[in-house]
Image: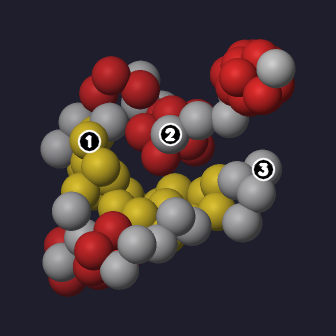
Amino acid sequence: MIARVFLVIAMGCALQGCGTQSAMTARATSCRTLNVDIVNSRYSREGSTTVWCAKCRDKLYLCVSNPDHSRVECKEATPDLCE
């Protein structure tokens, strides 16, 4: 029974667009999810899920979201922000 509940939640999340940082970055930029690479930055090393750096088409982005990931903003960044 518990496994079914988790399955239903996971399916609902997938249908609503809950996603990975790559998917959220793609939605906030003009990139496709397959073209987005999450950069191993200080944010990821600290375990942040609301701030991350991503690369797409040779552009570096600094992305931020609110805790429930309903809003995401990505802006081009300089390498020093994503070390």
Disc 2 and disc 3: Cα gap in Å?
A: 12 Å
Disc 1 and disc 2: Cα gap in Å?
A: 11 Å
Amino acid under disc 2: Thr
Picture residue at 78% right of the left edge, 28% below the top = 2
Q: Are marks 2 and 3 in contact (CB under 8 Å)?
A: no
Label 1, residues with CA under 10 Å away: few <14, some 14-19, many ≥20: some
Check disc 3 and report its element: helix, strand or loop.
Answer: loop
Which mark's residue is nearer the viewer, 1 or 2?
Answer: 2
- Position of the N terminus by quadrant: top right
Check disc 2 and report its element: helix, strand or loop.
Answer: loop
Which mark's residue is nearer the viewer, 2 or 3?
Answer: 2
Label 2, residues with CA under 10 Å away: few <14, some 14-19, many ≥20: few
Residue 70 is marked as 3
**Which residue position is annotated with label 2?**
20
Amino acid under disc 3: Ser
Seen in the picture, residue 41 relative to 22 is either above or below; the reply is below
- Position of the C terminus by quadrant: bottom left
Seen in the picture, residue 72 relative to 4 is either above or below; the reply is below
Q: Earlier in the sequence, mark 1 or mark 3?
A: 1
Name the side, left or right, on which 80 lies relative to 8: left
> Closest to the observer: 20 or 30?
20
Amino acid under disc 1: Asp
**Which residue position is annotated with label 1?**
37
